[in-house]
Amino acid sequence: MSATIIDGKAFAAKVRAQVADEVTKLKSEHNITPGLAVILVGEDPASEVYVRNKGKQTVEVGMNSYEHKLDASTSEADLLALIDQLNNDPSVHGILCQLPLPDHLNEDLVINSIAPEKDVDGFHISNVGLLGTGQKSMVPCTPLGCLMMLRDHHGSLSGLNAVVVGRSNIVGKPMANLLLRDSCTVTIAHSRTKNIEEVCRAADIVVAAVGRPEMITGDWIGKGATVIDVGINRIPAPERGEGKMRLVGDVHFDSAKEVAGAITPVPGGVGPMTIACLLANTLTACARANNLPEPEGLTA
Ligand code: GUN
């Protein structure tokens, strides 16, 4: 039997609607409008698309969007000065500096100069440490979106065997920490893992975040397992015409869906959840900054 398809697009729309409701309440009951500042340095076309989408969706849920587009040659001192100004601006509740940065800028230094309570990416070393020790933090958007979908599908994740394929700071490691916090038995698999197919086959949950197109095929998946595909890879699609490309995940969808119990598609799975969770994090940061209760179901 074919797997249940987890519809990330519909789920993200639900999250955005909940965020929009909460924003309406914040405005009418407290006269507060959450604000998200996004910094883009340089002209990377993919980053420009992301930033445009973020700005558009921020405004759609009723928040203020502040875009700061800086020249590719911007000095580190100037970028840090802007972050300092945003850190001290009470109308800004979330700050995101789009990565990757041009080579002359030190990414770690820049990320760690964002006030941790405004770090809606959850990349600041303080937030990494807080998440790793099970304390209240800002949680990276993509893993948070994956967690929301898993909780929605399974209810409790307690005692499930989860394998995260990929060990990046942005997805793999925080994902593993979140699953551990929900009492999964967690394995992080990567390029050096022995018998990786077998490790994956024993899992109730597989989260694929390696960045290798269609690496995980149906024979890696245990019967009935839930598969969350974080990968977004552009590959040639000659069948669509010369020079055409198509998007695929890290999972070979057609073979995996024949074995899995549930699976996220690419596109339309994890992708739309990332920006929805960015908006959720901005709302959470705004609630915390104003000592208001955090909206339910939008945080880890
Ligand atoms: N570049 C690609 N994805 C992301 C993200 O989630 N956050 C930031 N800051 N930059 C990115």
Image (cartoon, helix red, strand yellow):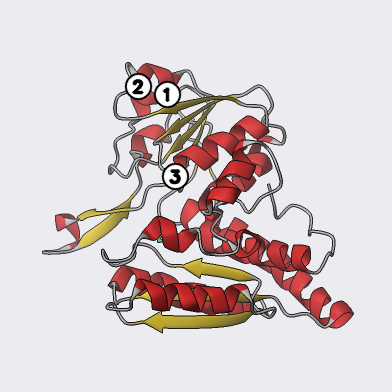
Q: Amino acid at mark 1?
A: Cys
Looking at the image, tell me whether mark 3 or mark 1 is earlier in sequence order.
3
Whether residue 180 is situated above or below residue 53 in the rendered picture = above
Q: Is residue 103 shown to the viewer in this render?
A: yes
Q: Residues within 10 Å of mark 3 (few under 14, many from 20)?
A: few
Whether residue 184 is situated above or below residue 92 in the rendered picture = above
Could you tell me residue 19's position as x and y percent? 70, 67
SS at circle 2? helix
Residue at 49% over, 30% down: 1
Q: Nearer the viewer, residue 42 or 145?
A: 42
SS at circle 1? helix
Q: Amino acid at mark 3?
A: Asn
Q: Residues within 10 Å of mark 1 (few under 14, many from 20)?
A: many
Q: Nearer the viewer, residue 172 or 85?
A: 85
* Residue at numbered disc 3: 169
Quadrant hosting ligand 1? bottom left
Could you tell me residue 106's position as x and y percent? 35, 60
* Residue at numbered disc 2: 196
Mark number displayed over residue 200: 1
Is there a contact, CB below 8 Å, between mark 1 and mark 2? yes
Left or right of 102? Residue 262 is: right
Is there a contact, CB below 8 Å, between mark 3 and mark 2? no
Q: Amino acid at mark 2?
A: Ile
